Each structure stands twice: as C-alpha cells, then as structure tokens.
C-alpha cells in the first residue's frame, strides 16, 4: 500500500502551507519609497501600525454612526455569542440556522437518495450535491426584488473530498494503484460546482426545486479555454490538439460573480492532483508544486488506465511516462466562468485573469462607463495579490459576455509608506521579456507566479478572500496566517513574523478608479487571542475580547449595509486547543471598529462561503469538512457520518440579518 496523506496533511500542511516562492523580491525595507527605517518597522509596533491604518471608509456616500468613545449607535443588531465547542451551528437569540443541501442531496436525473455510510455509486454522485462546500453565490430568479428574494439559483463550490467519508471503507489502493474504477468516478463527481434552483415557500421554508437549471459540473466536465492562452502550445493536449478545450475543474475554493449574472469558480490547489516524475519539471509545474513522486499526489487518480484519469500523470520520461500529458496541469489554475441560467452552456476558463492558486475573485461595483476590476489572491505562503482590469468599459444594458477575455492583469506592491502600486503583467513591460524567459502574453499568464516574481511583487501571508465595499469600492482581504514568516521577513503589510493568527488588509484605489495603478492601503485588524488581537486604527488599537477573538480569517463578505462578515478557518492545535473554540463567523463594522461573533460551526469544520438574498433576509453560508478534527455527526446527528452543508440563517421576525 502506498502511504496516503491524511486530509489534514493535504489541505493544511500539504498545499497551502508550502512555500514555493523562491524569488528574492525586495521586502519593504528595500523599496525605493521607503520612509520608515528598518528599526522602526521592527520596534515601532503600534505607532507604525497606527500611522498606516488611518480610517479609510471616508467616501461621502457612507455615514459613520459614530466612533468608539464618542458614543454611537451600533449598526450590529444582535448580541455577541460566546465561543463554542458544540457539534452544532449556533446563532444569537432571535435567529435560526438550518442545514440545507448537504453533500449527497439528489438534484438531477433520477434523483438518487443519499445513503449514509458511503454507499452511493459514482453515477449517483454525478446527480447529487458534491462534497466539501466552499464559495457560493445566489442568483435571483423571476421579476423584481421581492420575487428574486424568495426564488433563485445557488451555485456552490466543492473544494475537495474526504475519501474515508465518501467510500464505505476509505479509498482502495493496492500497491499504490486505484483498483476500483467507480471509486475514482465518484471522487471526480464529488468535485466541482453544484448549480441548484431553490425557493422559499409561504411558511418561510427554503427547498430545492427539481427544475431544469440544476446541474453538476465536475472534475471531468468539458470546458473551453478562453482568452490569451487559448490555442497556445502550453495547453495543447491529446484531448484538445489545438489547445481550445480541456476537462474539468478541481479544488474550487472561493468564487466570484459578474454584473452580467454569471458565476466565477476558482481553482486553488490544483497542483496536488497531478504528478510529474521527470528529473526536471518545467516552471509551469514546479512553481505551482506539481507532485514529484506518486506518494505526494492527492488521490492517485492517475493510476487508473482510463485516459480521463491517467491524464493526471504529466510525466514524460522513464517508466512512469504514459501518453504525453505534459500540458494537462497547465489547463488548471484558472478562474472559470459558468452561466447558471443556461444549463447547456460550456464553462470557460478565463485565462486573462492569470494562473495561480486562485482563492477567489471579487468584482468592483459596476459603474456604467467605467472599467471593472476583479481582485484576486493566491493562497500560498509568500504569494501575491492581483487585480484584473477589463479593457472595455461596462455597459449595463448590453454587457459583453466575453468581457473577461480582454484586459490587464496587475500584481500588488505594498509600499512601506501606505501607498501601493499595481504592476502590469504585460508581455514586453516591466522585464517580462524574452531575456527573462517570457515569450508572449500567453507565456506570462501560464507562468503568472514567475511573472509576479520578476516584477518584484510583495509576498503576502496567504491571501484568502476579498470583499469590496458596495458603495466605496474599498477592498478588504484576509491574510489567513503564515507561520513561516520570520521576524526578519516582516514588512508593513505583513507585520508579524511568525504570523499564526492572520490579519486583514484593505486598500482604496487612487481617485476611486477601478483601473488606477496606484492605491493607498492600511491594516484593518490583527487577529488573535486576547492580548494579541486588535482592531486598527487606534492608539494601540482596540483589543479583541471575549466577544470577538478569532484567528485565521478566511471567508469575507460585505453586505449591502457595509457590514463586513468574517469567517474563520483555523486548523491543528489552534482549532482543537486554542481559546477560539470551533470555527466561526463574525460581523464587523469598519466605521466603528466593532466586531461581534454571530455564528459558530460544528466540531472540526471550517466556516466558509457566504451569500444572501437581495433583501438580506436569508443568509447562506457553508460548513466544510465537519468532523475533520474531532468527532462530528452534523448535520444528521445520531451515528451518521458528518456531511458538508450549506446553512440558511434567518431572523425569527423575518427581518434583515443583523440590522438593529
Ligand atoms: Fe481553499 Fe485558501 O482556502
Ligand atoms: Ca479558503
Ligand atoms: Ca483557509
């Protein structure tokens, strides 16, 4: 038997946590615009952070209710709940939380019932909700605000699988080979995206509609390669000799959406699905961490004989070389656009948005006549923050459905004085030239990480979710943690080394223009336990306390009122032994500095994915991998296996979530 990594190894210690950035990009102290001495960065602590974190939400469209100390009326209309270690979803008094669309729920075809114990077949799974829910978006249906708030389509990402829950007795491996084809078929089908029509009845209960929109997109679904990389040599495969098509999407982490009503799903740790045992991997594999030996890849799909699975072996030399699958890994690591309203549509990989471990993608508020910006993070230690700006200006009445194929990809440089630069990753500019190994825009995009290394981008503490303020366009992004950063590697944007608890950074484009190439940034909150965590700005920052200590911020979302919702993804001893309890969700008001715990999840889960109906009276979030660390039988109870699931949160009086 080959040694297989555990779930935790793969997700929490195998992919995100490995630094593959060996570039020697300058840290803050090396940057020309440096205004603070190295000594001050290390010693200045609160003073420096305070200087860098002047209040940002200053656009005239937002009215502060007041500030701490001056007396103010809170915009958070609920009492904070305590940390929890219960195997349950908990919300404040006056609210209800209900599991909805758990893994295995039948949604299409013959609607095969979910069977506890892993007894469903691969064919069943192709017609059921996938595993390990992550990013999500709600698309209203029908006419108008009221109808659209009771009837819509939910798109749900499924990041990865847990083989010991998926199958009756874990994955079957004999001499390292996957001997049961249906197990692999089921695993492929448990990945991807679920598109589901849902409706609220007169009694206020949400249910699944067995309608024509429902669809499963999996790790095997045919897709189109769109944008500058389409047809490039690096994506020509046996499946698509002209480099225009590819198969499947994996590790769909967070998400995005477009103003024209499509869903964006993001391929994060795709590299772990592949092996390449060649003595030297090409940079488009190595810089992303494609496995070098069989024992390191995730699920060993490539050990099957069928071409659809063998393709996960990109080795070209030696005994392990099979057919020539060297370019298969290059067809992953993209943002994928899905039209939820057209179940027959082919998903498109939008290559103009770059190739990296895409956490998610967050659009700037659409303003007719302006370009659109899409903000993105590469979730790995010491990786980068990006934005894509459309070439064309947004037309509300007739948006171009291929708008994401044309534009400029930028990477962020956070200067020490609180300014920032968006550096274009354009072939021929900023050193992205043949003498530095870049030969076309397609080459730049397939090797986005290498291009960002070349231009000297700022290495961040694992960028996870972003959120764009609906009125001001200011962007907040979680930097979940980075225990590998040393004190000597700290900079103003990543001020703690090591950084086990994570922080949230924010920025504002110069002139409030999405296409600006300069921005101003500050730190918003340093996560951590009491005595460590603090909300900025402030003389020493407002300390986090019982009502709001948290760590490893991950999911992030602004509601329509400008309340920022923060979700956590702690793992390891932080989850099982820390003061934070189970993973949680908090509501924060950047105007006042308040943060309150609103939700706690069941044992061993991650809280992720967030969406709402237009009236903000139903809030959807996702519980991923309950029971991963610690025993859970959520949501079915008894001795049932735990299941990832969406949760619907409503207010018992039918009101707007969290409004006073
Ligand atoms: Fe899939 Fe970075 O979380
Ligand atoms: Ca995440
Ligand atoms: Ca995470």
Image (spheres, grey):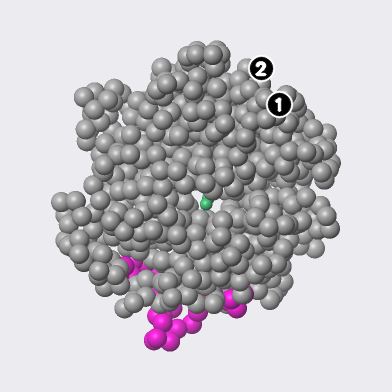
Question: Is 237 on the left-hand or right-hand side of 37?
Answer: right
**211 horizontally vs 414: left or right:** right
Q: Nearer the viewer, mark 1 or mark 2?
A: 1
**Separation (CA) of disc 1 from disc 2:** 14 Å
Q: Quadrant of residue 165?
A: top right
Viewport quadrant of the C terminus: bottom right
Numbered disc 1: secondary structure: strand
Residue nearer the viewer, 594 or 655: 594
The residue indicated by pointer 1 is 174
Sequence order check: which comes first, mark 1 or mark 2? 1
Q: Position of residue 373 (x, y in %)?
A: 38, 46
Q: Magenta stretch: residue 597 in it? A: no
- Residue 660 in the image: above or below residue 85: below
Q: Which residue is mark 2?
A: 305
| Residue at figure coordinates x 72%, y 71% from the top left | 652
Residue 453 tag number = none
Residue 169 percent across, percent down from the top left: 78, 38
In this view of the protein, can residue 94 be seen by the observer?
yes
């Amino acid at each position: 038997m080959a040694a297989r990594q555990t779930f935790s190894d793969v997700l929490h210690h195998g992919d995100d946590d490995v630094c593959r950035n060996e570039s020697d990009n300058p840290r803050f102290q090396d940057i020309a615009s440096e205004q603070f001495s190295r000594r001050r960065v290390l010693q200045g602590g609160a003073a420096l952070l305070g200087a860098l974190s002047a209040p940002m939400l200053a656009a005239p469209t937002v009215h502060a209710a007041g500030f701490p100390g001056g007396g103010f009326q809170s915009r958070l209309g609920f009492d904070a709940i305590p940390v929890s270690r219960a195997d349950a979803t908990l919300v404040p008094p006056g609210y209800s939380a209900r599991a909805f669309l758990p893994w295995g729920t039948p949604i299409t075809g013959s609607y095969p019932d979910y069977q506890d114990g892993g007894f469903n077949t691969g064919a069943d799974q192709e017609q059921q909700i996938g595993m390990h829910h992550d990013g999500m978006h709600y698309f209203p249906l029908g006419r108008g605000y009221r109808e659209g708030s009771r009837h819509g389509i939910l798109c749900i990402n499924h990041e990865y699988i847990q083989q010991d829950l998926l199958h009756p007795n874990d994955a079957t491996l004999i001499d390292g080979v996957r001997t049961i084809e249906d197990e692999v078929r089921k695993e492929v089908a448990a990945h991807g995206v679920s598109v589901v029509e849902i409706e609220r009845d007169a009694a206020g209960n949400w249910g699944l509609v067995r309608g024509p929109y429902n669809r499963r997109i999996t790790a095997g679904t045919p897709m189109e390669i769109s944008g500058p990389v389409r047809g490039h040599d690096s994506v020509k495969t046996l499946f698509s000799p002209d480099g225009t098509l590819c198969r499947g999407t994996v590790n769909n982490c967070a998400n995005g959406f477009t103003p024209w009503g499509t869903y964006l799903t993001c391929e994060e740790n795709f590299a772990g699905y592949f092996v390449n045992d060649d003595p030297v991997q090409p940079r488009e594999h190595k810089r992303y961490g494609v496995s070098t030996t069989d024992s390191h890849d995730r699920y060993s799909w490539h050990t099957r004989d069928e071409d659809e699975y063998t393709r996960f072996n990109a080795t070209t030399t030696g005994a392990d070389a099979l057919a020539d699958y060297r370019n298969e890994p290059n067809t992953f690591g993209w943002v994928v656009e899905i039209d939820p309203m057209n179940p027959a549509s082919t998903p498109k990989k939008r290559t103009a948005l770059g190739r990296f471990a895409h956490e998610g993608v967050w659009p700037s508020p659409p303003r007719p006549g302006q370009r659109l910006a899409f903000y993105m993070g590469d979730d790995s230690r010491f990786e980068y923050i990006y934005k894509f700006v459309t070439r064309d200006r947004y037309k509300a009445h007739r948006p171009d459905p291929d708008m994401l194929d044309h534009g400029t990809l930028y990477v962020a440089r956070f200067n020490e004085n609180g300014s920032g630069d968006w550096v274009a990753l354009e072939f021929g500019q900023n050193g992205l030239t043949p003498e530095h190994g870049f030969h076309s825009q397609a080459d730049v995009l397939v090797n986005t990480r290498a291009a960002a290394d070349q231009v000297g981008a700022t290495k961040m503490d694992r960028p996870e979710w972003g959120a764009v303020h609906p009125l001001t366009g200011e962007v907040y992004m979680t930097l979940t943690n980075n225990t590998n950063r040393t004190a000597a590697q700290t900079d103003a944007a990543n001020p703690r080394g090591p950084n086990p608890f994570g922080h949230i950074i924010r920025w504002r484009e110069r002139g409030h223009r999405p296409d600006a190439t300069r921005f101003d940034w500050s730190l918003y909150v340093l996560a951590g336990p009491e005595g460590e965590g603090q909300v900025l700005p402030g003389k020493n920052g407002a300390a986090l306390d019982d009502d709001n200590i948290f760590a490893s911020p991950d999911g992030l979302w602004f509601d329509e009122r400008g309340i920022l919702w923060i979700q956590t993804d702690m793992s390891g001893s932080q989850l099982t032994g820390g003061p934070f309890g189970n993973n949680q969700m908090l509501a924060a008001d950047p105007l006042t500095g308040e943060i309150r715990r609103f939700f706690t999840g069941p044992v061993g889960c991650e809280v992720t994915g967030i969406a709402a109906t237009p009236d903000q009276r139903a809030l959807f979030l996702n519980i991923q991998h309950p029971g991963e660390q610690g025993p859970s039988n959520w949501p079915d109870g008894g001795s049932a296996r735990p299941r990832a699931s969406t949760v619907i949160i409503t207010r018992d009086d039918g009101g707007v979530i969290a409004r006073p």
